[in-house]
Image: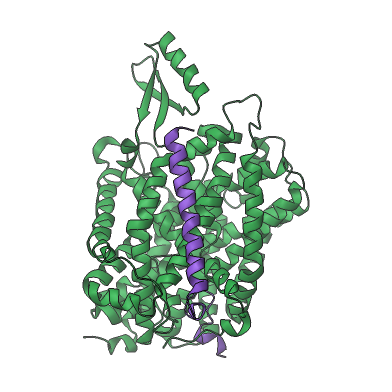
Amino acid sequence: MATSSKKKDGWGSSVGVIFAVAGSAVGLANFLRFPGNVAQFGGGAFMLAYFVSLLVIALPVAWAEWTLGRYGGQQGYHSCPGILFSIGKKPIFKYLGLLGVIIPLVIFMYYVYVEAWCLGYAVNFALDNLHFGEIKDSSEFWLNFVGAYQDGSAVGFGVKQVGIYLLIVFALNMMLIYRGISKGIEVFCRYALPTLIVIAIIVLIKVMTLGTPNAAKPMWNIENGLGFMWNPTKVYLEEKLPNGNWTRGDEIIGRKNLDSKEALVAAEPDTYRLKEMTVWDQLRRPKLWLIAASQVFFSLSVGFGIVLTYSSYMKKDDDVVLSSLSAASANEFAEVGLGGLISIPAAYAFLGAAGVMGQTLFGLGFNVLPMVFSVMPLGALFGFLFFFLLFLAGVNAAISTLQPGVAFLEENLNIGRKRSVAIIGTITLMGASFVIWFSKDLKALDSLNFWAADFLIYVIACIQVIIFGWIFGIDKGFNELHRGAAIRIPNIFKYVIKYLCPLFLLTIFALWLLLDVFGLGGTGIDQRILDLTGHGDIPPNPVAWMSVGIIVMLLIFMGLIVASNPRYKKLNY
Amino acid sequence: MTIGGWIIMLLSVSSVTMLMIWCIYKVLTTPGETEHIHGFEQKTPDEDED
């Protein structure tokens, strides 16, 4: 049964409630993961795909998941397998629901690592260790800090190594979830989150006024950085090689840059040419859509079980429409309005296009932001505050990724919270140890992130929206969605949820399989697939295989638990 | 930055900001709504165990 929240007793403030909802959305993904994804794909095309994904995919999936969760909670189920089984009424659904347990659990294994980076950077800013003259010094510090040069090198306990911070962060997360978290989250949302937003706005203003930090690279400036992030069309200079092939150089941004390149092409037309990639050329890449959609899912914590679990605790007439929309809006403001505008233009101003695109997913913020703080008055203080508050946001978000696993074990093994947390803690400690040990090139983090947070999120989101629209029934679902709602979603979204959203998801997925997995179309196979298969003289990557192995083993382990749950057997229809 | 870039940026940032402001407005002006919206801050029923 849904449990009434005690939060109103301690709050006494409508604004506090709003921040509580926002707190469930704002996290590391806004300030670190989103800029990393934008950097890799760049441009207005990614942003277009992102917003289309938000409207056509993420919001419909969010509404479906909040509704299914609240409904399942009313039936007495609080984990994804139970909720989906109680709605789908066939055994397959309890196994499909396992994804809603595995994905957040796997995410926690590397998310806690990134939290540790934030804490480590906060401490080092407080000790004024992060005052860099050049971007390469900042990058060097980060690569050593996270152990990117060699496996096992992150397992150190100095101030400038991530090991000690990971221990602290992991213990803190476990202590908080072990003892109960609602009070802590209340305090965070009331004080730390608003402070984080204010600090982020101050940093944003500083970034927007950075101008050209490196006089030797006048094209590397904030305006061109904004162009990198938002321009819908990309222009590249291509150079002809002696063998007759053309090779693509950096993206050309800015009028002066373009003028100089046009002059070069006019002077040497046989050696150079300009290649324009329109927004439609970019939007034809299925992987761009896959990543854009996955980023929205990850960022909103939608589609992979967390919302399903938490909404199962709601009362039957609580408002899922405005809850989900409010959380989404706060998330998008933090992500697009703050996170993206802070990191990407600053990264471009310090690194240029090639440097930005060469960053790892989470690494961009840690390489670039110290440079921003280095040129700010009271930079060390702002750097400490920013990364410490980001750390707190990370703790808040990380704990939410543990709850689906905790609820799963409680429901399936009939054990209490503390025992469940102990088991989850053991599993995730092993996973986090795997991530921190195999830190070379951040391979373990990257592999787990792709397979759990890009690939499997997509799968479970698709499953949930199909269940909502086709099995639960779109009319029944829409009525259930609007129970207790203060606003009405336009009826067009019935068709969006039932037809357009699944079609969109399945089409992108099919195209990604054909083009990026099987390599049809000549665009090349996805690197994560090549990590598993090997290519040319490069053998399969064992860390990538171990990452997939971890996910498979968890699926088997939890599948066996689900298969033997007598409570689910009673549900067999 | 091109004209297209400025348009996309200004539309994107303003729309997410306006959406957030509108949501806050709806929450604050709908009677009793603060009792019925939730994030992940809820006290889960198992927190009182053991």
Percent from the top left, x then y, of residue B27? Answer: 49, 72
- Most extreme residue toward the top, as rendered? A267
Among the chains, which one is purple? B
Placement of A168 over or under A361, stated as above or below: below
Residues A226 and A510: in front is A226
Indicate the quadrant containing the N terminus of chain A: top left, top right, bottom left or bottom right.
bottom left
Among the chains, which one is green? A
Percent from the top left, x then y, of residue A212? Answer: 63, 31
Q: Is residue A214 left or right of residue A545?
A: right
In this picture the colour scheme is by chain
Placement of A368 over or under A86, stated as above or below: above
Residue at the spot 24% in from the left edge and 52% down from the top edge: A507
Residue at the spot 46% in from the left edge and 75% down from the top edge: A405
Res. A149 visible in picture: yes
The image quadrant of residue A310 is: bottom left
Residue at the spot 61% in from the left edge and 75% down from the top edge: A186
The image quadrant of residue A377 is: top right
Residue at the spot 23% in from the left edge and 79% down from the top edge: A90
Residues A94 and A31: in front is A31
The image quadrant of residue A162 is: bottom right
Residues A311 and A16: in front is A16
Indicate the quadrant containing the C terminus of chain A: top left, top right, bottom left or bottom right.
bottom left
